[in-house]
Amino acid sequence: MRLVFAGTPPVAVTALRALLDSRHTVAAVVTRPDAPAGRGRRVEPSPVAEVAGELGLETLKPIRPNDPVFQARLREIAPDCCPVTAYGALLPGAVLGIPRHGWVNLHFSVLPAWRGAAPVNHAILHGDDITGATTFQLVREMDAGPVFGVLTEPIRPADTAGDLLDRLATSGAELLVATLDGIEDGTLRAIPQPAEGVSYAPKLTPADARVDWKRPAHLIDRQIRACTPDPGAWTEFGGARLKLWPVTPASAPSPDDLARPAASGAPGAGLAPGELRAERDAVYTGTATYPVRLGDVQPPGKRRMPAADWARGLHAGPAAHLGFA
């Protein structure tokens, strides 16, 4: 089939490369307009636009998909189907009707669970054991179209959103190619999503990533992993933000121990929520239940570093706390 691929971030690049290696023809790419990125906030093309440029693919960057010029060009290209992965904009009905096989979206959850912009983050945040990916026909309602194919993926205890999304990007790209093969062959038909089990996954904000050490350790663990790498978990220390990477229980044999108080002799035992205890090779912080060992941290204006290295430069007293302005 003749395709126009729509996608924007790095996860979409994996799908684009899989389509380029398939029996189908990618005639053009649709992506979000160039935008400020990085510390210098220089205007840069999206990861998908960058790859498309390297490969000499025509790249369309409409500010809004209802732009008549964009729609006219899409009609001229005359795609049979438009596969989508994390494009980042809602498509109007006039655009959805241009390809004869419609727009087929690769979404990183098992629909109807976690419709929206951040399905992987919310699956970790809410403690799901299993997630996956779904290919479905785009309709005007968000992530509500009929389903072509599904795969599942276990969520590992130490998975960050980045780890899990990397795995799903690879397996999901294979699912997307198989879906397009089935559509072309006439062997695949979309099935309506069930009415029950719908949940929503809005994009996580920096406010969602602020750690409250008065919460149980297992919820803090999920929150930090769900926000890694984006939007990046953080806490306050000395009136400034301290960026956080995943934590581990102080000395617990299983994740279940995160939900109950530490034994009196365990590392970090007796710490109040947010209270710090720095040892030679580790830094412990109290929570509402079990103390946790900090992983890497990043103070403002400095590099990412192990928490023990950070603590050695603090000369903090015994009353040092996280999360207290």
Image: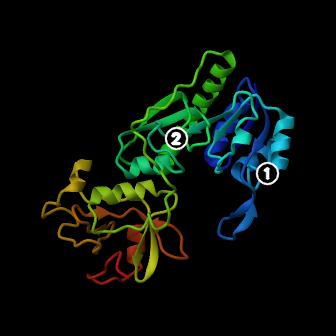
Instruction: Say whether residue 180 is left or right of residue 303.
Output: right
Q: Residue at x 36, y 59 (%)?
A: 247
Disc 1 crowd rating (10 Å Cα; few below 14, some 14-19, many 20+) is few
* Residue type for callout 2: Phe
Question: Which residue carries the number 1 mark?
Answer: 67
Query: Circle 1 — which element?
Result: loop
Q: How many marks?
A: 2
Q: Nearer the viewer, residue 39 or 113?
A: 113
Residue 204 in picture, x, y percent from top left? 49, 59
Disc 2 crowd rating (10 Å Cα; few below 14, some 14-19, many 20+) is many
Residue 315 in picture, x, y percent from top left? 36, 83
**Is residue 302 in view from this perspective?**
yes
Instruction: Say whether residue 94 is left or right of residue 258.
Output: right
Instruction: Say whether residue 148 is left or right of residue 103.
Output: left
* Residue type for callout 1: Asp
Quadrant containing the C terminus in the rendered view: bottom left
Q: Are marks 2 and 1 in contact (CB under 8 Å)?
A: no
Question: Which residue carries the number 2 mark?
Answer: 108
Q: Residue at x 75, y 64 (%)?
A: 43
Label 2 or label 1, whichever comes before in sequence order = 1
Q: Residue at x 64, y 28 (%)?
A: 177
Rendering colour mode = rainbow
Residue 91 in picture, x, y percent from top left? 68, 45
